[in-house]
Amino acid sequence: MTVRSLSRRHFLAAGSAAAIAPVVIPGSALGLDGAAAPSERIVVGGIGIGRRGGHVLGSFLEQPDVRFAAVCDIKEARRTAVKKMADTKHGDDRCTMHRDFRELLDLQHIDAVLIATGPNWHGTMSAHAARAGKDIYCEKPCTKTIAQSLALRDIIRRTGRVFQAGTQRRNLPHFAFACELARTGRLGEMRRLYAHPAGMQAAMSGWLPAEPAPDPKEVDWELYLGPAAWRPFNPRLLDGFNFEKGGGLVGGGVLEWGSHCVDLCQWAVNDRPPPVEYAPPRDGQIVARYDDGVELVFREQGWIPLGSCPVRFEGETGWVETGDSGKFVLSSPDLLAGRKVAKIGGYPATFHVRDFLDCVKTRAKPKGNEEAACNAHIACHAANVAIALGRPVRYDNATNRFVGDEEANRLLSEACREPWRM
């Protein structure tokens, strides 16, 4: 390409024309009409946007400072649907589609990623995203094993990324109030914390009869399996929410709902290291104990009807119980101390997403950060090990191993299929 020199007359004429010609700048570029200016926008990509991912993506798209720029999914139909959703929101066709998540992570304009794949991928993909320089909002359960929980925590520390586990109840006012009562001593010295698992079983993930695999452009079975053990294609496995998670153990509700409820119990005791003793299920309960004797009880029955994901905190002088209805029950009305606590039913992700986005800008730690997620997940995984072995186990937070128990220690990690490593 050649560069032509301009005479002074041509230069001045061009300058005069530019001076009088009107320049139209859209209001969105200036941050008007409720839109954020480009310098304030967070560019987000989404990986594995199915039913739950679509719900959380809706919360991202509600935020005026978010630009959703890329979607990755192993299903062509989902890629197309999410692109249409984003393009409709932004009024253009700029959202790009990808089948391989590594292509999306290579995009330099992406600031943060929403990871909402099946649990099989969460930990490994979060590690890849952190190393690619992306901040991460990851649905839970975030890890499959204790080893993955520790590794992911350490990777987030080393890379300095912002990490938010999808434990959205940390940003709902009635759960926050209940945890505050426990943390600040309003209930007296803590005695017992109750978490609700939606089941207490542990079993190996199975195989289903082989069926003809689809074209990878439509459904990429190899990428769906990822680090999981290979098995033949069967469409019933494509949306298996409990597929290959938990140290080779399906994990049941201890890891699924449990990682929500245990996370709240951990928050109630200041996100301390997880319990050290875990008993197998007995009379519908799993009893775990912290090193100071406080009990963490996984309990299926006996709850006040306050909605799904209930938790209960009992102290020396009082107790509180709450759930997804947005309501709570207190041992004494005096615990309210004249406060009004907003009651938000269900478990919307909007507040949790906003917490994450604010921390992306400030580089602060969000409420569901990597430390909190690691400790809550270790508690669930250790309880799962006690279920699988059918006997008590003791976990050492200093060495991150079970004490004198090689059978349990073999369940700290699991082999991953090549080439997938955290």
Image (tube, grey):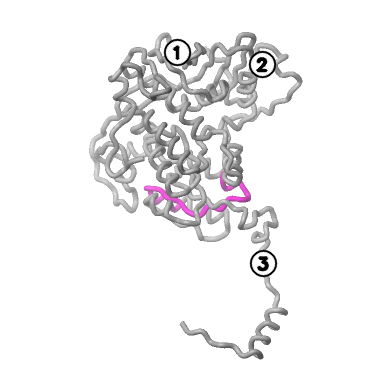
Image vertical order of residue 6 relative to residue 92, above or below: below
342 and 385: which is toward the camera? 385
Q: Residues within 10 Å of mark 2 (few under 14, many from 20)?
A: some
Residue found at x 47% / y 15%: 291
**Residue occupied by mark 2:** 186
Of circles 1 and 3, the one toward us is: 1
- Residue 284 falls in which quadrant of the image? top left
Any mark on residue 287, and which?
A: 1
Residue found at x 60% / y 32%: 171
Q: Position of residue 395 (x, y in %)?
A: 39, 19
- Residue 201 falls in which quadrant of the image? top left
Look at the image and say whether residue 202 sits in the magenta stretch.
no
Look at the image and say whether residue 71 sits in the magenta stretch.
yes
| Amino acid type for the residue under numbered disc 3 | Ile
255 and 323: which is toward the camera? 255
Alpha carbon separation for disc pair 1 and 3:
63 Å
Q: Position of residue 210 (x, y in %)?
A: 23, 39
Q: Is residue 250 left or right of residue 177?
A: left
**Residue occupied by mark 3:** 25
- Residue 306 falls in which quadrant of the image? top right
Any mark on residue 120, and which?
A: none
Residue 308 visible from this viewpoint: no
Part of the protein shown in magenta? 60-80
